[in-house]
Structure formats: structure tokens, C-alpha cells
Amino acid sequence: MLRKLIRTLGLGSLALFQFAAALAAEGPAATVSGRSSYVLADSIGLGLHLEKLEAGLQAKLGGPSLINYDAGRSITGAGNPQGKSALASVAADRQIIARASVIIIILGMEQHEASFADSQQELMRELQIIAPQASYYWVDIGATISIHAANWNARNTIIHDNAGRLGYSVISRYKAIFGPSANPLRIVAGQEFPASMADPGWSPDKIHGASAALSKAILDAVSSDSCAAGN
């Protein structure tokens, strides 16, 4: 399974680099129709890519969409196979991000940071310097592995508490998986994902899955933002 994941991630990385090269070739003055979107994610982004979230975002917003995903990455820690932290990917994708009207962040499961709150603030600062006009969303943690649940509850508390101060809206993966009454600040340790939400080709691991449900939650949030913006 791990080899399959790395191979699939590698194919996604190639598409990402080709997308970036083509966009960079257009030059800084290039314009695109509609509103473009950029998703910065850990391995959860792979499921969304396979679920064709990019196409969904393009249909909703009218502009191009890119998911930059890497397994095991954090804000400051490198993933695999790209070997880039989220901050390094922001630096590499600067031209794409500068054109984005919607930016979605799916990070927090990995425990690499000495201070997640400080790293989160640094990431948002870098993104908002590049794309001050964008609408920002942060997806909370929906994973339920028992030994990590307490840490993930603490991370979700930071993600929700910092939304107003750092300038993003929260999309709840935990609620997308377990229902609107579920509390993402009280993850139930070891809870199984609903069988109906398994991703094709993935073994249940209480981390991955429910990509269709999260994709819908993201598209619903973006649609609401578009309506508010008058689009």
C-alpha cells in the first residue's frame, strides 16, 4: 500500500510541476478567467485529487485549480516523495498562489513543529503576503487513531481558535465524516470511519478516506463564498 501511495503521489507531483511550469511560462502579467484555487495539503490531498476535487473547484469558480499534496508533510517538515515542507511548497508555487482567489490548507496531523501555533502563523503570513486578496480556508483534522487523538484535539483547538485572528474560515473534516453534531475538539479516539466513506483502493486506517464527503464540504464552503462575493 505504501509503494502504491508513493507512486501515486509521484504522478501527482509530476502534474504539479508541469502545471507550474506552464503557468510560469505565461509570465507575471498572465490572466485567467474565473477564480483560481490552490490547495496545500498532506496525504489527505491525494484522496481529494483522486476524487477530482480540482475539476469540482474549477466548475464552481471558473478558474484553474491545483492541489499540492505530499504524504507525511507538516508546515515545517518535509513529506514524501516531494521532499518539501508546506513552507517550501509555498515558496516554489509562489506564482500560482499569487493568482489564487481561494486557498485551502489541509495540514496539522503531523507532529513535527515545536509550536504548531507559531508555524501556522508563519505559514499564513507567507501566504497572505503573496495572495492578500484570496479567501482562505483551513480544514481541521478528522483522523481518529487512538494514540494521536489527544494531540489532534489540541491541534483542532488551535485551528478553530485562530481562524478569526489569522484570517481563514474552518472547514471541518471531522464533521464531514461523523456528522454535523460531531465535535472536532473532542475526537473520539479509535472511532471507525463509516464503511460507506471508504476511498476506493485504500485500506481503512482511521486517517484516510471520506474524500467524497470532504470534497463536498469544500465545494459547499467555496460556493457560499462565491455567492457572498457576488459570483
Image (cartoon, rainbow, N blue to C red):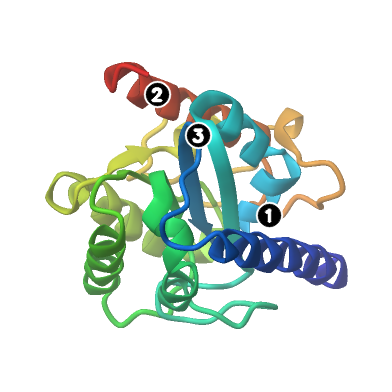
Residue type marked 3: Ser
Q: Distance between the residues labelled 2 and 3?
A: 38 Å
Which residue is painted at 49% across and 72% down in the image? 89
Which residue is painted at 45% across and 78% down in the image? 88
Where residue 5 sits: x, y (%)?
79, 65
Q: Distance between the residues labelled 3 and 1?
A: 26 Å
Which element is circle 2 on? loop
Per the rendering, the mark at residue 46 is: 1
Where residue 166 sits: x, y (%)?
18, 53
The quadrant of the picture occupied by the C terminus is top left
Which element is circle 3 on? loop
Which residue is painted at 62% across and 30% down in the image? 56
Q: Mark 2 points at which residue?
A: 181
Looking at the image, is mark 2 or mark 3 earlier in the sequence? Answer: 3
Per the rendering, the mark at residue 144 is: none
Per the rendering, the mark at residue 33 is: 3
Q: Mark 1 and mark 3 in contact (Cβ < 8 Å)? A: no
Q: Which of marks 1 and 2 is in front?
A: 1
Q: For this rendering, which residue is in front, 213 or 64?
A: 64
Q: Is 35 displayed left or right of 114 in the figure?
A: right
The residue carrying pointer 1 sits among few (fewer than 14), some (14 to 19) or many (20 or more) residues within 10 Å by Cα, namely: many
Residue type marked 1: Leu
Which residue is painted at 33% across and 52% down in the image? 156
Q: Above or below — where is 183 with respect to 206?
A: above
Q: For this rendering, which residue is in front, 128 or 81?
A: 128
Where residue 14 sits: x, y (%)?
75, 68
